[in-house]
Amino acid sequence: MNNYSIDYIIQDEIEGLKAENFSPKLNKQNNNKIESSITKEESSQINNSMEVIDKESQNQVADQMFNPDIEQVRKSGEIIIEEGERIENIIKKYIDNYNNLLETLISSLKDLNHEQIGAIAHLSGSILILNCLMTIIIALFGDKILKYFRLEEKYPKLANYFKIRQQILNINLIINFLIIISVLIVIIYLNLVILLN
């Protein structure tokens, strides 16, 4: 027998088995029919083909089980890419606006004389000093609230958090004091330059 007839017999027997009985156990009549019509070599080829078909059907079942998940992952990936592009466009727009604002400020500063630039420096320094003072006041006020409500005693598990907060608060106070002192020195210098000229 040639390969074409073996394939035809295998296909015919498999389709018959699928139609009659899809379970892996075949009844005795089907086994007798198959054994009487084929040789040992053909039966080993049929067994190999059945194994291949079983593997293919398992792969198809696995594909059917996991394809919806793959599709969801693909769709989620596309959504993430679209959102990323949208966020990138928003960031580019803000950067462009920021650059336009800087160009406008630089061009307007070029038109000012020394006294006007000094006034802008005084104004900026005063605003910075106010900002630092507000930061110091808020930090000290928060510390007073912690002591007033005795939160360290009521919540001992948060004691490490309060210690770290106190260390950061001390560093923050030092930085703010240094900023205030440096801004005051710059303002005094600018005033002396304007007065002596």
Image (cartoon, rainbow, N blue to C red):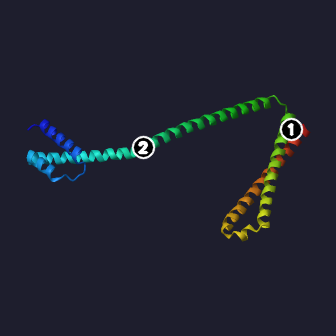
For this rendering, which residue is in front, 104 or 56? 56
Q: Residues within 10 Å of mark 2 (few under 14, many from 20)?
A: few
Residue 88 placed where, x, y %? 59, 36
Q: State the mark number for residue 59.
A: none
Instruction: Pick the residue in front: 100 or 6.
Output: 6
Q: Quadrant of the N terminus?
A: top left
Q: Residue at x 52, y 39 (%)?
A: 79
Judged from the image, the secondary structure of the residue bearing numbered disc 2 is helix
Viewer-nearest of discs 2 and 1: 2
Task: Give the class, few, some or many, for how many residues have Cα within 10 Å of label 1's Cα (few <14, many ≥20).
Answer: some
Of residues 88 and 110, the one nearer the viewer is: 88
Q: Which mark is residue 68?
A: 2
Which residue is disc 1 drawn over?
119
Relative to 144, is 10 on the left or the right? left
Type of residue at label 1?
Ala
Q: Which quarter of the image is occupied by the C terminus? A: top right
Q: Position of residue 153 (x, y in %)?
A: 72, 71
Under circle 1, the secondary element is helix
Q: In the rendered image, which quarter is residue 127 located in?
A: top right
- Taking the image as shown, residue 62 lies to the left or right of residue 80, namely left
Along the viewing direction, whichever of 139 and 79 lies nearer the viewer: 79
